[in-house]
Image (tube, rainbow, N blue to C red):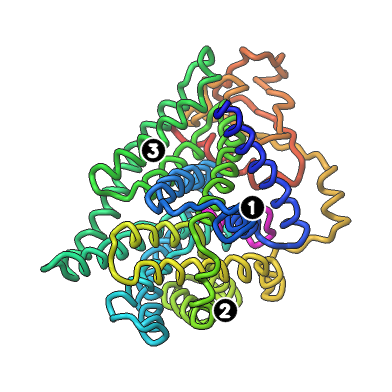
């Protein structure tokens, strides 16, 4: 009977999250904020009156959720999309995080009555953007693709620096003899090990998913979950950044021509949404809303400094010589959303038992709440005002959605798709093989039709998915 009650409770919470997400979308509020508020309503100060104070459990749930979100973020893109923004994204993931941590730490030292190391700990915790918040904000956005990809890559790769800074400063506070040199070694170790394991497992994942036999095709999501969890767990066991490794492995699978790509994308998109719901509700449960009022005034000041001064300066320093225009840099500055990761890092502080830990958690939660509400809900508006949005009149959008285009792809001997069945080509949804011309005539298409060298593959697709189809054809041209 107990199990039935638990299942009913879980079902009611999930149903409530759907209603809350729908209401948030109608009001223009980010759904992540709605989930946080739902958790706070269920919690000790809300009507639900649920007393939840297990920071360790909340951190575990949040880490698992963030792993699922990062993997889906990598899976739904490709290396070809990120290649042109790799350098600025890498600088934003490192230089911008360090600059933000330093400047936010100074601001926290001035605003809050805490020692300097504790102030820099606050700065480190809120220094990185959050993958969950950024991916959710950009999912249905019309922001220019280059900017969107830069923000996605930054949020997918900047976790190691923030984690290393946070863990390092906590160790500096709690361990005699620990210093700046130890923090630098920890940071480099996390980045290098995460990068190496992510690349190695990414290559292995590409081989697996490009050759997974159709007889066990229905288990493709199981295989992707296995590689996802192994990537994170193995990397963390050797002291690397599991978040970076997971993102790279997802990116490798997303860049691989495979008959299972559409299935995996749909599966992990749903899993990532479920992870967002659970993660942010649990994090909302952990906070005691009445305690936020004690940091409200100074928390608002820190949030304003972070949004309008600290983040823009960090972006400007990180993008010198990147080719971004002033309006694009201003948008990158505004789009530095904080979310789950800072709260996860704040739970590390609580678990460490250091002084001021509850104060630090409340400050971080308040900054995240302000950032997600104001930056998340105004992202599209700011993009429009800064003219960094791909504008297309509504009538033209409707017209292009009805317009079906065709393109020819000539298969050369070196191309990756030689020998592939037509259902292994990884076409995006709504695109299909219209015909294959082999020599002077078209051949009959069946599920056993294989692509040969010198074939002309004719693909039909809606005009709205042309960028996705271009990504797929880039992968067709490569050797696996």
* Secondary structure mostly seen in the magenta stretch: helix
Q: Which mark is residue 202?
A: 3
The range drawn in magenta is 131-145
Whether tag 3 and tag 2 are in contact, CB under 8 A, the answer is no
Q: Earlier in the sequence, mark 1 or mark 2?
A: 1
Label 2 belongs to which residue? 326
Q: Nearer the viewer, residue 186 or 150?
A: 186
Q: Nearer the viewer, residue 287 or 425?
A: 287
Q: Is residue 136 magenta?
A: yes
Spatial CA distance of label 3 from label 1 is 24 Å
Q: Secondary structure at mark 1?
A: loop
Spatial CA distance of label 1 from label 2 is 24 Å
Query: Can residue 84 be seen in this snapshot?
Result: no
Placement of 25 over or under 261, stated as above or below = below
- Quarter of image, res 109: bottom left
Outermost residue toward the bottom in this view? 110
Q: Quadrant of the N terminus?
A: top right
Q: Earlier in the sequence, mark 3 or mark 1?
A: 1
Residue at 65% across, 20% down: 438
Q: Is residue 179 magenta?
A: no
């Amino acid at each position: 009977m107990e199990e039935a009650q638990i299942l009913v409770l879980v079902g009611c919470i999930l149903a409530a999250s759907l209603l809350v997400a729908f209401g948030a979308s109608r009001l223009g509020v980010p759904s992540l904020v709605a989930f946080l508020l739902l958790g706070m309503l269920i919690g000790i100060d809300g009507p639900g009156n649920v007393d939840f104070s297990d920071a360790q459990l909340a951190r575990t749930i949040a880490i698992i959720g963030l792993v699922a979100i990062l993997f889906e973020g990598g899976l739904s893109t490709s290396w070809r999309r990120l290649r042109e923004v790799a350098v600025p994204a890498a600088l934003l993931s490192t230089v911008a995080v360090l600059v933000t941590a330093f400047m936010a730490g100074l601001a926290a030292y001035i605003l809050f009555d805490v020692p300097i190391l504790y102030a820099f700990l606050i700065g480190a915790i809120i220094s990185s953007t959050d993958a969950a918040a950024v991916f959710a904000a950009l999912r249905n956005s019309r922001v220019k693709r280059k900017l969107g990809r830069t923000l996605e890559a930054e949020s997918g790769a900047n976790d190691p620096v923030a984690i290393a800074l946070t863990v390092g400063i906590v160790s500096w506070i709690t361990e005699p003899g620990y210093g700046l040199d130890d923090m630098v070694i920890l940071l480099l170790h996390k980045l290098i090990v995460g990068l190496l394991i992510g690349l190695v497992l990414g290559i292995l994942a590409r081989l697996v998913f490009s050759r997974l036999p159709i007889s066990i095709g229905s288990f493709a999501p199981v295989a992707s979950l296995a590689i996802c969890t192994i990537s994170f767990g193995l990397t963390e066991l050797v002291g690397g950044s599991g978040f970076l490794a997971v993102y790279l492995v997802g990116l490798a699978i997303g860049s691989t021509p495979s008959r299972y790509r559409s299935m995996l994308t749909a599966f992990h998109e749903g899993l990532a949404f479920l992870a967002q719901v659970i993660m942010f509700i649990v994090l909302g449960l952990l906070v005691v809303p009445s305690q936020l009022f004690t940091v409200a005034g100074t928390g608002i000041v820190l949030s304003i400094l972070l949004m309008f001064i600290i983040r823009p300066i960090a972006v400007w320093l990180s993008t010198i010589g990147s080719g971004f225009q002033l309006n694009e840099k201003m948008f990158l500055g505004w789009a530095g959303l904080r979310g789950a990761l800072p709260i996860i890092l704040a739970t590390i502080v609580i678990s460490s038992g250091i002084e001021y830990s509850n104060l630090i958690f409340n400050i971080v939660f308040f900054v995240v709440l302000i950032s997600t509400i104001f930056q998340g809900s105004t992202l599209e508006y700011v993009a429009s005002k800064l003219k960094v949005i791909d504008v297309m009149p509504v009538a033209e959008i409707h017209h292009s959605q009805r317009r079906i285009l065709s393109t020819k792809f000539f298969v050369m001997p070196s191309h990756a798709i030689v020998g592939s069945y037509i259902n292994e080509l990884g076409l995006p949804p709504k695109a299909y093989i219209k015909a294959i011309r082999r020599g002077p005539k078209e051949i009959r298409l069946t599920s056993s039709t294989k692509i040969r060298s010198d074939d002309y593959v004719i693909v039909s697709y809606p005009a709205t998915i042309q960028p996705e189809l271009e990504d797929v054809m880039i992968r067709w041209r490569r050797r696996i």
